[in-house]
Image: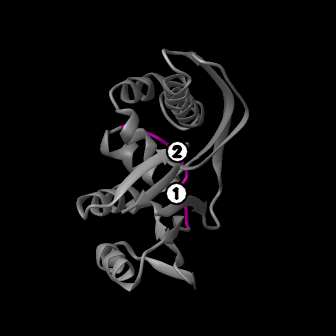
Amino acid sequence: MFLLTPFMANAKEYKDTVYVTHTAETSADAKNIAIDDARRQILYNILSQYSNPEELNILLQNTTDMELTNFISFSSIANEQSSKTVYSANVTMSIDNAVVKKWLQDHEINNWLPVVDSIATFTTVMNINGVSDWVEIKQLTKKYDLSTKNIVSNQIVTEIPSVYRSQFTASVREAGWHYSDNNGVLHIWK
């Protein structure tokens, strides 16, 4: 298993915190809905300051929750509460400026979101089962500018530019690894 946590390298952080509460058949479903709702609210709150709010709202409505996940570089949850059917929390998220700016431009949304000089990265903490797993990961990531930071026993710490997060996840999945997103943290295991 490897754990991916986002990291912004020397960049201005665009973040917001929202309170969300949702009811569903289970608290897990309510939490998923609440996190998706928080992501949309935060993206709107931040980006509406740098673009036309009406155009942005239409674009957000026509974008899947999975795609919006790629725009978040960091997330945290505070004051989390749940029951059998209800979930509520204060959710904080930071956007990946470069990825979001490209998305807005690709959809012809005029914006004045500042250009980030440094590259946003995410950190991977990989727990591997031997050298063969490491060789496989190195092969999968050679086109994503993987930077190895630390190796201790079966744990490897690396950084990859955030712009490659979705492609990296797809490559790992296609190679037979499993993954899940837990509040913005990507878990991958074989």
Q: Secondary structure at mark 1?
A: loop
The amino acid on which the numbered mark 2 sits, given as a three-letter code, is Asn
Q: Nearer the viewer, mark 2 or mark 1?
A: 2
Q: Quadrant of residue 166?
A: bottom left
Can you tell which mark lies on residue 90? none
Q: Quadrant of the C terminus?
A: bottom left
First along the sequence among labels 2 and 1: 1
Q: Please report the residue visible at 35 percent of the width from the left and 55 percent of the height from the top.
A: 178
Q: What residue range appears in magenta?
A: 109-117
Q: Position of residue 83 (x, y in %)?
A: 65, 19
Label of residue 182 in the image: 2
Q: Residue at x 39, y 80 (%)?
A: 134
Q: Is residue 115 magenta?
A: yes
Q: CA distance from mark 2 to mark 1?
A: 29 Å
> Could you tell me if residue 182 is visible in this image?
yes
Q: Position of residue 185 (x, y in %)?
A: 53, 51
Q: Is residue 137 left or right of residue 77?
A: left
Query: Viewed as shown, does residue 134 lie left or right of 83?
Result: left
